[in-house]
Amino acid sequence: MNPKLAKFIFLQRLYALTEQIMYPVIAVVLLILLAFQLYGIYTISLERFVITERLDALNETHNQITGKRSLPIAERDTYSAALLKLIPLTEDIFQITSTINALAADTDMKIDQFSPPREADVKKGTTQVSVNISGTTTAFENFLQKYQYLSGRFMTLSSVRVSYKDGTVTAQLTLVFYTAPIPKDKTELTGLRDPQRKLLTTIKPYLEKLGSAGIIDDSETVDVDYPTAGSF
Amino acid sequence: MTSSIFTKKINLFTAVEEQRAAATKKLRTFSVLCMRISMLLGLLLMFSFLIQIKLRSDNAQFASSLKSVEQRIESQFEHQLKMSVIDGRLAKIASASTSDIQYVSLHTRIYKLLSLAGVSLRMNKLTIEKQHQFTAEVEFLSSEDLRTYLTVVEGPEFQKKIKQFSVQDFRLNKPDAKNNSVTLSIGGTIL
């Protein structure tokens, strides 16, 4: 056969074959693309489903939280600061010691005997401390007025043993200090309930006094560059 | 002879050509079908693109609203957390205060009870413990005062008052030889 004719026939057949095969190939490619596209739509829909569910849950949480009674922000900050001083999160034995010293000094009572509590004395959010104090009757009355709220820590008396002699008082007191944790999740959030609201109006003046008085600034640094007696 | 061979060849060629034409026709039909399917798939692909774009924009919108709700909840949670701190601590104060010994008021009540007789007396010691159990040590300046006091104690007014105190212990101590005074111990529970 003439080589030119053979080439012509070959090319013609190739063209015909290409023409016949092109559409099935395109269909297969489009099918693959569509499969990818559908998978993309599936993942986006899944993402949307997750987002919608989360959004619903958050909206529900928001409704739960906002449904509770509260206070204006300024009052809230003052009272929460004061109450966190009165009843801190964890017990600080040094703070108890300084509170008792400050209370005695403030009320002109003398501390005769006081043993700071040990770690073992701190139980279930309460710490019992025994202290012997003495002073005049007036100073003792002053002490009794101030111990609960104005000392900086909320404390109660669990036993009192008082001896009066010639205008002076000697007292053996068992004081109880309290700590409380803060709520960990939304189910523990309570808002301000009515009985507490009533108590709040009663002790408001003390809390305002405590809340506004010197909140410790964490940014303050202690200067340790002071002269020492000598090297060890 | 030559013409017969030629005819045979033509017939063979025709038969082959017919077969080829039938095969080509089948292939062409399949090709047309594929073309139609491709058009349909192309159309579907275009729609799926549009759907994907719409879903993506919706998701972005949802995500941004999710973020804003989260921020709102965070600030609200912080607010309510502080409120719960206030509430929890006030509740603790309220419950602790019930067990607190209200020394001033209890002292006043006990002193009033003791003063009912109207005689001179001095409360030397007062111990109050949990459950409002108390012990008081009272000094009478003379035994005469004590006698008066004990007479009053038997009286109806005192008996009425004493019920509030549930007195269990009523003990006379030794008289003090130096200043003629006598000491009385009284103990019980303040109701």
Image: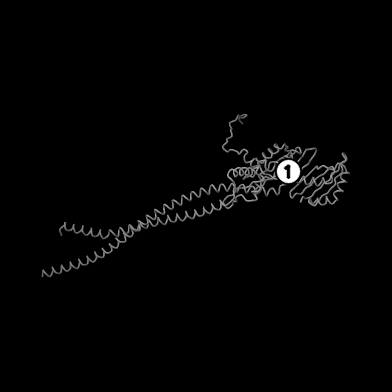
Specify whether B163 is left or right of A155: right
Image quarter (top left, top right, bottom left or bottom right) of the C terminus of chain A: top right
- Figure label count: 1
- Whole-percent x and y of residue A84? 62, 44
User: Label 1 belongs to which residue?
Assistant: A173
For the residue pair A57 and A158, the one nearer the viewer reads as: A57
Specify whether A185 is left or right of A146: left
- Whole-percent x and y of residue B190? 77, 50
- Whole-percent x and y of residue B184? 84, 45
Specify whether B177 is left or right of B188: right
- Whole-percent x and y of residue B36? 30, 61
Vertical position of residue B80 compared to residue A166: above or below: below
Tell me the quarter of the picture where residue A23 sits.
bottom left
For the residue pair A189 and B112, the one nearer the viewer reads as: B112
Q: Secondary structure at mark 1?
A: strand
Tell me the quarter of the picture where residue A48 sits.
bottom left
Q: How is the image coloured?
A: one colour
Residue at coordinates 21% horizontally, 67% vertically from top-left? Answer: B18
Vertical position of residue A93 compared to residue A224: above or below: below
Tell me the quarter of the picture where residue B35 sits.
bottom left
For the residue pair B110 and A30, the one nearer the viewer reads as: B110
Image quarter (top left, top right, bottom left or bottom right) of the N terminus of chain A: bottom left
Q: Amino acid at mark 1?
A: Leu
Mark 1 is surrounded, within 10 Å at the Cα level, by few (under 14), some (14 to 19) or many (20 or more) other residues, namely many
Q: Chain of mark 1?
A: A
